[in-house]
Amino acid sequence: DQQVKQNSPSLSVQEGRISILNCDYTNSMFDYFLWYKKYPAEGPTFLISISSIKDKNEDGRFTVFLNKSAKHLSLHIVPSQPGDSAVYFCAASLSFSGNTGKLIFGQGTTLQVKP
Amino acid sequence: DSGVTQTPKHLITATGQRVTLRCSPRSGDLSVYWYQQSLDQGLQFLIQYYNGEERAKGNILERFSAQQFPDLHSELNLSSLELGDSALYFCASSVDKGGELFFGEGSRLTVL
């Protein structure tokens, strides 16, 4: 039972354009959502997060949108840069309602930004 | 550099053997998490320890065990290894039970 799903295994965009990565979840109890970026031979690094009481969080070129009714979140990168090419993981947790900070990850989306 | 240290970085062993993966969390972090990433798979949660005690358990096989020591470092023990155990094993840490997790660079295990 995959509680967090990233249905697009890969995405290719042109430098300077917008990248939109999508993520769906099934557990309505999730209260905290995060995006991680992963380069080859490195561990995942935190990118941006959003709590369930918000519907948008912005940090520089990165914006995360949360639609609780649809159980859907998305990551927008504007403008996209070649250095953004990596695998992006969506993750969810029960940080505030549960007694654990464990993250449930999606399968990842490989983003390629072409110069 | 996340501040989370994992050793060894690479490990090659044979089926039936036992290995131990080691993780040192960031200074001040009390929680340690172990994740497994098999080929083309997402990160699967294995187990979490908080200040020496098990806090959450995922789909961890009975052949696998973990512990967190008083100095807060953690070890993941994998025994009776099978070919399917070949994967990247990540350790992560956090201050407490929620928020951002900081990941190490992983230990790549190859079982031949």
Image: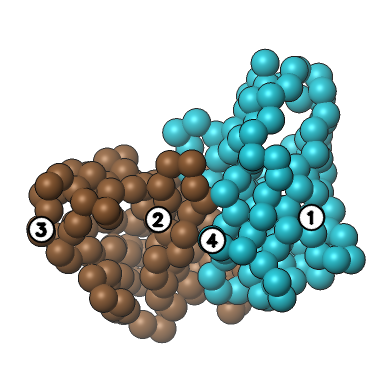
Chain colours: A brown, B cyan
Residue at which label 2 appears: A37
The residue beneath circle 4 is: B1
Q: Position of residue A92 (x, y in %)?
A: 49, 63
Residue at the outermost right position:
B70
Q: Give the residue number, with chain letter if any, for mark 1.
A: B74
> SS at mark 2?
strand
Subunit of label 1? B
For label 3, the crowd category at 10 Å Cα-Cα, with few meaning under 14, some 14 to 19 and many 20 or more, is: some
Q: Amino acid at mark 4?
A: Asp
* Residue A8 visible here: no
Q: Nearer the viewer, residue B26 or A59?
A: B26
Q: Amino acid at mark 2?
A: Lys
Extreme residue toward the front, this view: B1
Say whether mark 1 and mark 2 are on the same chain: no
Q: Is residue A46 visible?
A: yes
Q: Is residue B12 above or below residue B68?
A: above
**Disc 4 versus disc 1: nearer the observer:** 4
Real-space Cα distance between discs 3 and 2?
19 Å
| Residue in the picture at 36% in, 82% down | A54
Please say if the residues under marks 4 and 3 sit with CB atoms less than 8 Å apart. no
Q: Earlier in the sequence, mark 3 or mark 2?
A: 3
Asked which quadrant contains residue A72, the reply is bottom left
The disc labelled 3 sits on which kind of residue?
Arg
Q: Residue at x 15, y 45 (%)?
A: A114
Instruction: Judge if badges 4 and 3 mark residues of a common chain.
Output: no
Residue A17 got which mark? Answer: 3
Asked if marks 4 and 1 fall on the same chain, the answer is yes
Point out the tag, 4 or 1, that comes first from the N-terminus: 4
Q: Quadrant of residue A68?
A: bottom left
Q: Position of residue B64 (x, y in %)?
A: 79, 39
Label 3: chain letter: A
